[in-house]
Amino acid sequence: MGRILLILLIIVLSFASTAVAVQVAPRISDREIIESLAAIRGDIKNLQGDIKNLQADIQGIRAEIKDVRAEIKDVRGEIKYLREEIKEEIKEIRGEMKWGFGILFSGMLILMGFILWDRRTTLVPVVREMKETRVEIEELKKQIKESAKREKELEQKERLIERIMRDYAARAPEFAETMRVAGLL
């Protein structure tokens, strides 16, 4: 029960504090109300004038936006035109590059052909000289073989002559003495 009284006391005090917090407004006269209304009407007219000025400014901004949009459209047209020009120039440059590379490679092939032709014309005399040198070498080999044969024949003849001279020295004592002096016996 004490609790209920405590709760009722808190509720009553809270309503009492709100009643004390509200102030009674002083009475406003009709004249003050009319003056306030006239001031409000003047403010409304000023605001309406400001709104009309803002609407006029908005119309001006809209016109400027239209002008900017028209300029943007013109710039887009110019950009499109420039893109087309750039595409055409790129095509021309590619064509010129193809010609340039064609001429370059043709020149390189001509140069290689000239080098091969020059090498062939240079090699022909060298090959001819090599053949002539081989023929000369073969002839020299033949001469060397013939010389070797002659040398063998001469050696055989020399041996034969030495044998004959020894046989003769064995029969002729004077000739033997001569050969001893010469160092042949």
Image: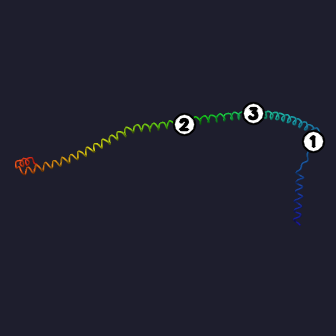
Q: From this viewpoint, which residue is outermost toward the right? A: 30
Residue at the farthest bottom position: 1
Q: Position of residue 71 (x, y in %)?
A: 73, 33
Q: Nearer the viewer, residue 81 or 178?
A: 178
User: In the rendered view, does 84 fall on the left or right side of 101?
Assistant: right
Q: Say which residue appears at 59% left-offset and 35% top-offset.
A: 95
Mark pair 2, 1: CA separation: 104 Å
Q: Are marks 3 and 2 in contact (CB under 8 Å)?
A: no
On the image, numbered disc 1 is attached to which residue? 28
Other residues around mark 3 within 10 Å, as few (<14) / some (14–19) / many (≥20): few
Whether residue 43 sits left or right of residue 166 in the image: it is right
SS of the residue under disc 1: loop
Q: Label for residue 102?
A: 2
- Between residue 80 and residue 8, name the one nearer to us: 80
Q: Which mark is residue 70?
A: 3
**Quarter-of-image position of residue 73:** top right
Contact (CB < 8 A) between labels 2 and 1? no
